[in-house]
Image (cartoon, rainbow, N blue to C red):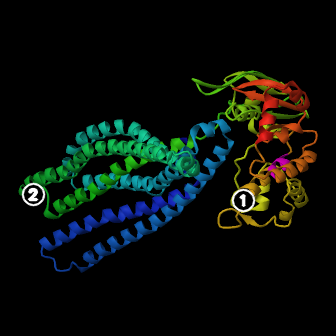
Amino acid sequence: MAWLRAMMSAHRRAFAAVIGLYGLAAVAGLAGPQVLGYLVDSVAAGHAEIEVPALLFVVLLIVQSALKRVARVRTGMLGEQVLAETRESFVGEALRLPLSTVEAAGTGDLLSRATTDADRVDHAVRNAIPEITVSAMTVVCTVVAMVVTSPLLSLGLLVVVPLLYFSCRWYWARVPSTIERMLGSWADVQTHLHETADGARTAEALGLVERRVALGRRALGVAVERERELRSLTVRWVPWMSLSQVLPIAVMLLIGAWAYARGLVGLGTLTTMVVYVQALSAPMEELLWWAEDVQVSGTAVRRILGVRGSDDARRDGRPRGREIVVSGVRYGYSADREVLHGIDLRIPPGERLAIVGPSGAGKSTLGRLLAGVAAPSSGSVTIGGAEVSRLPEDVLRSEVLLLTQEQHVFAGTLRENLTLPAGEWSDGDLRRALGAVGLEEWCDRLDTRLGAGAVAVSAAVAQQLALARVVLADPHTVVLDEATSLLDTSSARQLERSLSGVLEGRTVIAIAHRLHTAAAADRVAVVEDGRVTELGPHAELLARGGAYARLVAAAAVG
C-alpha cells in the first residue's frame, strides 16, 4: 500500500487525468438510459417528435466510446512509465543485495520477479486500477441514479447484498495464499529453464540431459497444478456472480409488474430501471474480476519489493588496518554438508598468497569468504579487525574484490563496460587499465559498442576486461579465483607479469590450478578436504615433499 501511494503521488496528474476521463465516460453512460426511458414514454404517449432524443442517445454512445478510447491510451502510457520505473528500481535493489542472497535465491527467481511479476504489475496499473476505479464510480452513480429514479424499484437490488458478501468473503479469503504459491511455482519453472539453458553443454557432457528435462517437467507440472487450484476456486465462485447479475432483474420485473398494474410507476421508468440494472451488471462484474487481478499483482508487487537488502545486515564500520585474519572458519552450503572445517589463516598486507589443492577441496569457497560474498557458519574472517561479511557493500568493495572466471560483457560501449565500478576516470586512465591487462589494441575503441547486436567479445577478452575493471577499482586486496583460466598458458603468464606491476603493494590471493602462479607467490596454502594442510613459501613446501610437492609433480607429468 505504501508503494501504491508513492506511485500515485508521483504520477498524480496522470492518474487524475485517466480517472477524470473514465468518470466522464461513466456519466455519459448514465445519461443514456435516462434518454432511452424518455423515448419509451414519448412513444407510449404518441409523441411524434423523437428525432432529437434519439440523436442525443446516439451522440452519448459515441461520446462515451471516445472518452473510453482516450482514457485507455492515457492509461497505457502511464502503465509503461510505471513499469519502467518498477524495473529500474528492482535492478537497483538487486544490485545492492549481498551476493550470497542473490545466489541463494537463484537467477531464475530474480528473472521471474523482473519479468513476469513486473508485467503483472504493469497489467494492474494499466488496466485493473483504472477499471476498478471507474467500475466503482459507475456502480455508485448508477445506484444513486436508480434510487432517484424510483426508490420502490431500487429495492430489488437488496437481494444481491448477502449473495455477494458471503461468496466474495469465501473467495477472497482463499485466493491470496493460492496466488502466492502459484507465482512461486512459476518462478521455479523459470529457474529450471534458465539453469538448464545456461548449463546445456555441461548437462550434455555429463549425460544429465534427460534428468534436466525431467526436473523441468516436474516443475511445470507443479506450476500447472497451482494454476488449477486458483481456477478451481474461480469456477466455484463464478456461478454466484452470474446469479447476482440476473436475480435483481427478475426481482425488479416482479416488483415493476406489480407497481405498474397499480399505477405506481410508468412504463418508461420501468424501462429505465431495467436498463440501469443491466448496465449495473457489467461494472459489477468488472469490479469483481479485476479485484482478482489486483490480488495477483499485489502478490507480484510484494515479490518485487521483497528484493531489498536489510539496512542492518551489514553495519560494521571501516577496517582499522589491512591484515586479513581467518579464525576457526567453518562453512557449509547446507546444514548436513560442511565444506570448510576449521580454517585458520593470517595474511599480512601486501602478501601474495596462492591457494592450491585438488578440485572440490574448498578453495573457491574460501575465496568467497575472504571476499565477503558469504559469511562463515562459525568462526570469523576479518580485515583490520572488522568482520568482512558485515561490512557495508560500498566499503567492502573498496577493500576487497573477488574476480572469478565467470564474467559478463554488458550491452554498451567499451567505456561503459570499464567504468562499472564507482568512480571517475579519464580516457588516459581507461587506456592504461586496458594496457595493463594486455588489451592495447582496444585502447582507441572506447566508444565501440559491445555485446548483443554489436561487436562480439570472446570469453578470454571478457575476462581481461574484468581484470581491467579491477585495476580501475583499485582495491587493496584482490581475490583471483581462476581469473586467467580462459587464456592459454602463454597469454596467462604474460598477463600475470603485466598485472604484477599494477598490483604491486596490494594483497593478492590467487586461487589457481596452474601451479606457475603458486611458484611466484610469497606463500602457498594447500587446501585439502576443507582444511589447510600446508602453508609456506614455494621452495620450502617443495623441500618438504608433502601434498604440494605431489601436486607439482603431478602437474609436471601432465
Q: Is residue 554 magenta?
A: no
The residue to which callout 1 is attached is 458
The residue type indicated by label 1 comes to Ser
The secondary structure that dominates the magenta segment is helix
The image shows residue 452, relative to residue 156, as above or below, that is below
Circle 2 Cα neighbour tier, 10 Å, few/some/many (<14 / 14–19 / ≥20): some
Circles 1 and 2: CB atoms closer than 8 Å: no
Residue 421 seen: yes
- The quarter of the picture where residue 314 lies is top right
The image shows residue 155, relative to residue 375, as above or below, that is below
The image shows residue 81, relative to residue 106, as above or below, that is below
- Measured in 3D between alpha carbons, the distance from the residue under mark 1 to the one under mark 2, in whole angstroms, is 85 Å
The residue to which callout 2 is attached is 260
| Residue 370 appears left or right of 180 | right
Residue 325 seen: no
Q: Residue pushed farthest left? A: 261
User: Which span of residues is magenta-colored?
Assistant: 467-473
Where residue 119 sits: x, y (%)? 50, 54
Where residue 83 sits: x, y (%)? 55, 55
- The quarter of the picture where residue 447 lies is bottom right
The residue type indicated by label 2 comes to Tyr
| Residue 100 appears left or right of 179 | right
Q: Nearer the viewer, residue 509 or 60?
A: 509
> What residue is at 68 percent from the left and 30 percent from the top?
312
Q: Nearer the viewer, residue 260 or 103?
A: 103
Circle 1 Cα neighbour tier, 10 Å, few/some/many (<14 / 14–19 / ≥20): few
Mark 1 or 2 closer to N-term? 2
| Residue 322 appears left or right of 49 | right
Q: Which quadrant of the figure contains the C terminus?
A: top right
> What residue is at 82 percent from the left and 66 percent from the top?
445
